[in-house]
Amino acid sequence: MATHLSREDFVRMDEKDILAGCRERFRLPEDIIYLDGNSLGAAPIAIMPTVARTIEQEWSRDLVRSWTAHGWIELPLDVGAAIARFVGARPEDVMVADSTTVNLFRLVCLALAIQKNRRVILVERDNFPADNYVAQGVAELLGGRVEIRAAAGDRLAADVDGDVALVLASQVDFRTGRMLDMSAVTRAVHEQGALILWDLSHSAGVVPIALEADDVDFAVGCGYKYLNGGPGAPSYLYVQRRWQDVARPPFFGWLGHASPFALEPQWQPAAGIRRMLGGTPPILSLVALKAALAAFDDVDLRAVRAKSLSLTSHFIDLVDERCARYGVRVVTPREDERRGSQVSVAFEHAYPAMQALIARGVIGDFRAPDLMRFGFAPLYVRYTDVWDVVAILDEVLSSRAWDRPEFLRRQYVT
Ligand SMILES: *Cc1c(COP(=O)(O)O)cnc(C)c1O
């Protein structure tokens, strides 16, 4: 679709944007357009004084007393409660611990412990490898009791049957930005007596999620993507209340004990989601994540979704209008209800083209084999960024600026 808009129109969209003021809550270099918040969110300004205060006024002054005096010991559950609004859950059904990979392991094992009589884990074929590797590892660990079956995202509902114990899927696909209908897929899975574990890494903070209303069994997600918790921020997990007290986690964390400081010889599970806790939590990282979430405090998440859809649809239209002639193709769904908050563009020379963009201050990323990925975090991405990035992409493609040895050389992290 031709847009025939000008940069002036995008300036006016920024002027009318009710979220425009949120950008000041982040520290971003002046000369950069950052479209990789789906990989590592930008740094919220509030993190720095909050972490400094934790070190200066809590750790260095109150020392070990801080576990109680400053509520450190409750932070995994407190921060979980703060994440609940992003995922449509009750505060007591979410907790924060470890990495997404570790939480996937916890919940895949928990689901299989509940579904003792079924032997298949149905995974989404194109999911991020971390998720499917965990499933493969669990299958190996269980020595043949379970097997993995894979289906494309839009086939999950059709391929689930009475052998399936658990379905493991991402709401938003990390490659293409395609969003699944969480409500419909969850219903189809339950109709076959299976359970579902949703990975929300590419959705929490940008798309509406209703874990409780959709009756989702389990969910996990990253703290460092759209939630901006910082590099390696801890991950969150959700367990639907009906499953919290019926099975035991795959490893018995001492903080998940019913009374950890009684130091009893035998592990006994704590009530509720607390039993999923492992060992001593990373307090500085939890404090940072909590401060990052506060950037959304007065923000209506529906406004975030509306701006996200507007940014991505304008970007798609401009890429079609200005760049299709160079052989690039938008692979992200154009229908709003099927799109997350990123746009992926296929191009034969995607890797060097992204390197050329980065050299010009436009930071997106590359995903093998041929995708340029652009993530739109509505709290700090501007409408004029959309216009400027497409103008720069047009220039890179028309001049073949990507065709240089320094851009063709692959780095380890892409
Ligand atoms: C980002 C991401 C991960 C990353 O997991 P880590 O344990 O934090 O490395 C896992 N799964 C999905 C779907 C992701 O998008």
Image (tube, grey):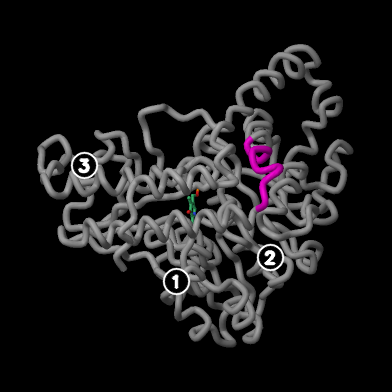
Distance from the alpha carbon under mark 2 to that under mark 1? 22 Å
Image vertical order of residue 370 relative to residue 64, above or below = below
Q: Secondary structure at mark 2?
A: loop
Disc on res. 410? 3
For label 1, the crowd category at 10 Å Cα-Cα, with few meaning under 14, some 14 to 19 and many 20 or more, is few
Left/right placement of residue 67 relative to residue 385 reads right
Image vertical order of residue 408 relative to residue 282, above or below = below
- Residue closest to the eye, 57 or 114: 57
Going 22% across and 57% down the picture, which residue do you hit?
323
User: Mark 3 belongs to which amino acid?
Assistant: Arg
Q: Quarter-wise, where is residue 292 in the image?
A: top right
For label 3, the crowd category at 10 Å Cα-Cα, with few meaning under 14, some 14 to 19 and many 20 or more, is few
Going 21% across and 46% down the picture, which residue do you hit?
353
Going 39% across and 43% down the picture, which residue do you hit?
385
The span picked out in magenta is: 292-300
Can you identify the residue that label 1 sits on?
335
Left/right placement of residue 104 relative to residue 60 reads left
Does the CB distance between marks 1 and 3 fall below 8 Å? no
Measured as percent of width and height from the top left, residue 177 is found at 42, 61
Left/right placement of residue 247 relative to residue 334 reads right
Q: Secondary structure at mark 3?
A: loop
Image vertical order of residue 274 relative to residue 242, above or below = above
- Residue closest to the eye, 177 or 122: 177
Foreground: disc 2 or disc 1: 1
User: Mark 2 belongs to which amino acid?
Assistant: Leu
